[in-house]
Amino acid sequence: QVQLVESGGGLVQPGGSLRLSCAASGIFFSINAMGWYRQAPGKQRELVASITDGGTSNYGDSVKGRFTISRDNAKNTVYLQMNSLNPEDTAVYYCNAAVRLISRSIISSWGQGTQVTVSS
């Protein structure tokens, strides 16, 4: 019913920047909060940043001041601008959305993940 497609991952040198995008498609009533999570090898998935449909954002402590989350409600798309990247940011980044279906029930939908590697 709902698909989230991420793009923008890749290999970047320490200190560099990347911009991730995640577009939602399918049949649904609306999208509430959207967010980005990441999972490094051997570690638990952690919240990177989230944003409500009203634009209120929240960040994980390790990315505050370096990453910026934004969204375009008209395009059902969320972005993650990542600056000053360091090797500890290397992980698979997953998009998440709280989607309100036509039935008005809410589901949590996940993207397939995009790899971000920070290395010289």
Image (cartoon, rainbow, N blue to C red):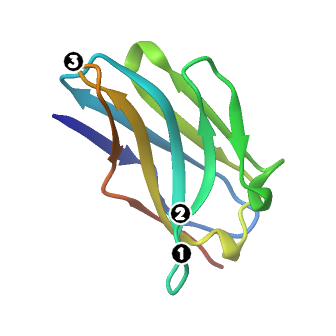
User: Which element is circle 2 on?
Assistant: strand
**Disc 1: which residue:** 44
**Disc 2: which residue:** 38
Q: Which of the 4 image quadrants contains residue 5?
A: top left
Distance (Cα) linking label 3 and label 2:
29 Å
Label 1 packing within 10 angstroms: few (<14), some (14-19), many (20+) = few
Label 2 packing within 10 angstroms: few (<14), some (14-19), many (20+) = many
Left or right side of 99 for 26 = left
Q: Can you name the residue that lies furthest to the right here?
A: 65
User: What kind of residue is marked 2?
Assistant: Arg
In terms of sequence position, does the residue under pointer 3 or pointer 1 come before the other?
1
Give the vertical position of 76 relative to 37 (above or below). Answer: above
**Disc 3: which residue:** 102
Distance (Cα) linking label 1 and label 2:
8 Å
User: What kind of residue is marked 1?
Assistant: Gln
Rendered-image quadrant of the N terminus: top left
Q: Residue 25, position in %: x, y?
A: 25, 29
Q: CB under 8 Å between callouts 3 and 1?
A: no
Q: Residue 44, position in %: x, y?
A: 53, 75
* Residue at 53% across, 56% down: 37
User: Which element is circle 1 on?
Assistant: loop
Left or right side of 25 for 9 = right
